[in-house]
């Protein structure tokens, strides 16, 4: 992941100003470099700069395939653009077993205007993390949140892997489909501890959706979910008809205000940065390597520089 890139792979200098003004092609180039030149000094510096300049609200949507996340994402993009906000969507698709690339299913369902410079959509592969976020996906979110006003990260969550969305999101939204038995399964898996907002999709199913929302509310009461001081709302929503979208917007706004109180968002992002470094080391060097890394004294203070320094030290056998 962090092996030194070849001279041919070394990125030319990019900076946040050029990314913010250069349009989709420049942003796409930067994301491509994340996948091909990871560990290059210029890229490490850019990612650390972006980590400090993250202005966007990062909304994470997770839930099983077919629950309606892409339809909801389309609706949220349209509403954000109508309000004059720029939006980036990162759809993390399952990896192809043959090529390792993204299957691009979520991106294919996105209905956006290719001429609209205020919307950027990108698919990335989950790699070996089923429904989760690869290290490249984390870096991509860090970059996008420094450029756009809203970043939506959509993952195909299966079982415990929904937890990965908490590595990057300010607000985690768990989508549940009526009559699918998901509420009981999620309660068994402990997933109810993760979301800040729960959406029961396809509210046009009426009574079935109401029953699902009631079951989910019961599961929440048993799991003790949500941060201290925050009550997780359960919203019945139909992105196709618009039902529940106002309530969803209100819940997101209230959670954003909650996170901005008492420095919660800054503390949350600082904890995420620590987790990024740990996960990157664990994926490459295993639990033994992570234990070695925790004993090392580092000169770097920013997350991507620390990650690169640890990779160099562990590869050389230090620690």
Image: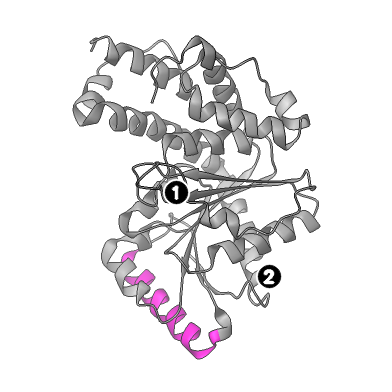
Rendered image: mark on residue 246: 2
Magenta stretch bounds: 205-224
Residue 51 visible in image: no
Q: Main secondary structure of the magenta part?
A: helix
Rendered image: mark on residue 165: 1
Left or right? Give the position of 129 relative to 73.
left
- Counting other residues with Cα less than 10 Å from the Cα at mark 1, is it few (<14), some (14-19), or many (20 or more)? many
Q: Is residue 209 above or below residue 299?
A: below
Left or right? Give the position of 218 relative to 235.
left
Q: Name the residue located 46 percent from the left edge and 19 percent from the top edge.
A: 39
Quarter in which the C terminus is drawn: top left
Rendered image: mark on residue 306: none
Q: Name the residue located 80 percent from the left edge and 51 percent from the top edge.
A: 84
Secondary structure category for the residue under label 2: helix
Q: Residue furthest bottom?
A: 207
Quarter in which the N terminus is drawn: top left
Asked whether 184 or 116 is in front, the reply is 116
């Amino acid at each position: 992941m962090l092996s030194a890139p070849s001279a041919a792979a070394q990125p030319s200098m990019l900076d946040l100003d050029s990314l913010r003004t250069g349009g989709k092609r420049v942003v796409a180039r930067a994301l491509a470099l994340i996948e091909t030149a990871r560990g290059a000094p210029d890229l490490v510096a850019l990612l650390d700069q972006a980590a400090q300049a993250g202005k966007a609200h990062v909304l994470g949507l997770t839930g099983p395939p077919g629950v309606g996340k892409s339809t909801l994402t389309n609706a949220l993009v349209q509403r954000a653009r109508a309000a004059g906000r720029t939006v980036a969507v990162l759809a993390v698709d399952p990896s192809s077993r043959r090529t390792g690339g993204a299957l691009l299913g979520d991106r294919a369902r996105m209905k956006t205007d290719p001429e609209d410079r205020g919307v950027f959509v990108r698919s990335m592969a989950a790699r070996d993390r089923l429904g989760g976020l690869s290290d490249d996906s984390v870096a991509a979110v860090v970059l996008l949140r420094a450029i756009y006003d809203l970043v939506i990260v959509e993952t195909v969550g299966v079982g415990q892997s929904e937890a990965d969305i908490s590595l990057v999101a300010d607000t985690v939204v768990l989508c549940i489909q009526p009559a699918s038995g998901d509420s009981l399964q999620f309660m068994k898996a402990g997933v109810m501890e993760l979301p800040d907002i729960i959406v029961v999709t396809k509210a046009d199913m009426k009574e079935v959706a109401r029953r699902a929302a009631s079951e989910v509310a019961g599961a929440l009461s048993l799991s003790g979910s949500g941060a201290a001081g925050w009550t997780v709302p359960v919203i019945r929503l139909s992105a196709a008809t618009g039902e529940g979208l106002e309530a969803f917007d209100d819940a997101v706004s209230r959670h954003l205000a909650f996170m901005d109180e008492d420095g919660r968002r800054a503390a949350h992002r600082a904890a995420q940065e620590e987790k990024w470094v740990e996960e990157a080391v664990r994926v490459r060097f295993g639990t033994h390597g992570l234990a070695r890394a925790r004993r090392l004294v580092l000169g770097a203070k920013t997350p991507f520089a620390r990650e690169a320094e640890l990779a160099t030290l562990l590869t050389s056998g230090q620690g």
